[in-house]
Image: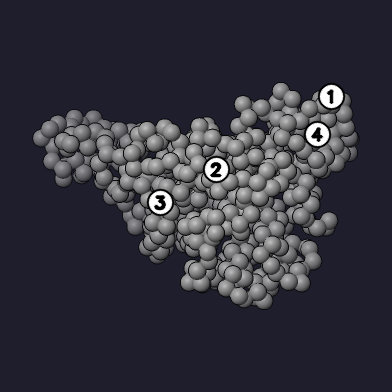
Amino acid sequence: MKLITKCSLLLGLVLTFSACTDLEETLNEDLTRQEAEAFLNANTDVGALLQSAYDGLRLPYMDQSRFWAAQEHTSDEVIGPTRGPDWDDNGIWRVLHDHTWGADHSFLESTFNELLQVVFTTTNILTFETTPSEAAQARFLRAFVMLSLVDGWGQVPFRQPGDNLLEPPTVLSGGEAVDFIISEAQDIISDLPEGPATVANKDAARALLMKAYLNKGAFANRENPTFDAGDMNQVISLADEIINSGKYSLAENYFDNFAPNNDVVSTENIFTGENIGGSNSGNVRSRWFCTLHYNQNPSGWNGFTTIADFYNKFDENDPRAEMDYEGMTNISGINAGFLVGQQFDADGNALEDRRGNALAFTEDVSLVETGNDLEITGVRVIKYPIDYVNGDNADNDYVFYRLADVMLMKAEALLRTGDAGQALDIVNEIRTTRGVEPFAELTLDNLLDERGRELYWEGHRRQDLIRFGEFLGTWNEKPASGPERLLFAIPPTALAVNPNLTQNPGY
């Protein structure tokens, strides 16, 4: 390929991300490689490109229909019932819940493509002159997204900086991809900033490494995960670096981690997606709009709920399940956590649904709801306290990694290597801080349940269920499923343009 073509492609990428200054020069066939590279580096705002990569996390992670749906609707935490004429969407939610999605599932296809766009964006940044910190942040974001692709699809189309864009990217699969992610994260830690949580930082890289090591054996053999002692020791060591840094502590108020001002009040958050209230946000508001009824404040979409079996995993007095939250409950009557039973407004007036029934959410919910009570079935979930100040551009930063998850991962690694005593102490530290009774003993079963209680609605559940060998089991209207469901299908559109991809078994 001629140099002019390469330069045009690079200039096209720069213009796409609006990261160039005024480009008035005309390139021609006589331009040397050195001149082209000097021109591009002089006219490229790498900081703007890097910000576009951060912003690129918003749609695939914050929207209710993307990676969060892939992780949660396929699990025992979330169900998206069709309510008469509402939320049918050609069955797109139902097939996630009962594990009958096909290769043409449009939301899964969009998620795959949008994650790959971040991989492309970050790799493109590395073709320009960057500071060590800029390069490390770009490589972290790329590794972070690649781990999601390995988790969901098992394959990651990948180019090195400077590879020929007219050739299909190579594909890293399974263990090869995880090894690359681990190598990248280890290599960049020293060049990453110390913080804040809204940027790729040293502890975010450590948390990413923990996820990679903890799930490495599950990604290699999803039907029968293995847990190498060396990998578990890495999880424990990395956790100790974070825990012993003195920068984090379990939040006194659990829901402060997700509040509109969580960048200020959370003592747990390690890595978050920044949302700037009132001006520049991803769709974090979907976490409450997708579950609230039309007649609540704000008027929601009356969609997703949790299921009774999951709701009933919580102790009666667990504040993670229900708590009044200042700045929300006093404004709307809505509590943080789970909404079940009769709902009220801020003045204590009982609310009704659109048919005049008492707006009293029930534990029972079906995939297809009919009848007079179809609007009120299912326990609703408010994990992120509602931002009543900033409207659609909510200020809640989106939580990717936080201290409690790090502690639970360390406890799991300890338990899997035979140190149940220390693992129990860690889990009980979390439970005691949250205001619930400590466990007498720790098993894999109650550890999985505790991860659910602590991390519900945060986008971890599918990965956890696979690692604990529970993903193919049964729950509310979901029959036992086959091992092909441990991976999503590679979208047919991706297969059509990249011969290096292969369709996953069963599709």
Within 10 Å of disc 4 (Cα), the crowding (few <14, some 14-19, many 20+) is many
**Depicted 239 relative to depicted 261: above or below:** below
Q: What residue is shown with label 2?
A: 67
Q: Earlier in the sequence, mark 1 or mark 4?
A: 1
Q: Amino acid at mark 2?
A: Phe
Q: Nearer the viewer, residue 457 or 362?
A: 362
Q: Earlier in the sequence, mark 2 or mark 4?
A: 2
Q: What residue is shown with label 3?
A: 173
Residue 459: image x %, image y %?
60, 48
Marks 4 and 3 sit apart, C-alpha to C-alpha, by 44 Å
Q: How many marks?
A: 4
Pointer 3 and pointer 2: residues touching (CB < 8 Å)?
no
**Depicted 309 relative to depicted 189: above or below:** above
Marks 1 and 4 sit apart, C-alpha to C-alpha, by 10 Å
Pointer 2 and pointer 4: residues touching (CB < 8 Å)?
no
Q: Amino acid at mark 3?
A: Ser
Quadrant, the N terminus: top left
Residue 355 numbered mark, or none: 1
Coloration of the structure image: one colour
Q: Quick check: can you spot residue 496?
A: yes
Pointer 1 and pointer 4: residues touching (CB < 8 Å)?
no
Q: Amino acid at mark 4?
A: Ile
Residue 76: image x %, image y %?
68, 47
Residue 507: image x %, image y %?
49, 38
Disc 1 element = loop
Q: Nearer the viewer, residue 229 or 269?
A: 229
Within 10 Å of disc 2 (Cα), the crowding (few <14, some 14-19, many 20+) is many
**Residue at (74, 62) in percent of width and height:** 434
Within 10 Å of disc 3 (Cα), the crowding (few <14, some 14-19, many 20+) is some
Q: What residue is shown with label 4?
A: 376
In the image: residue 498, left or right of residue 211: left
Q: Amino acid at mark 1?
A: Arg
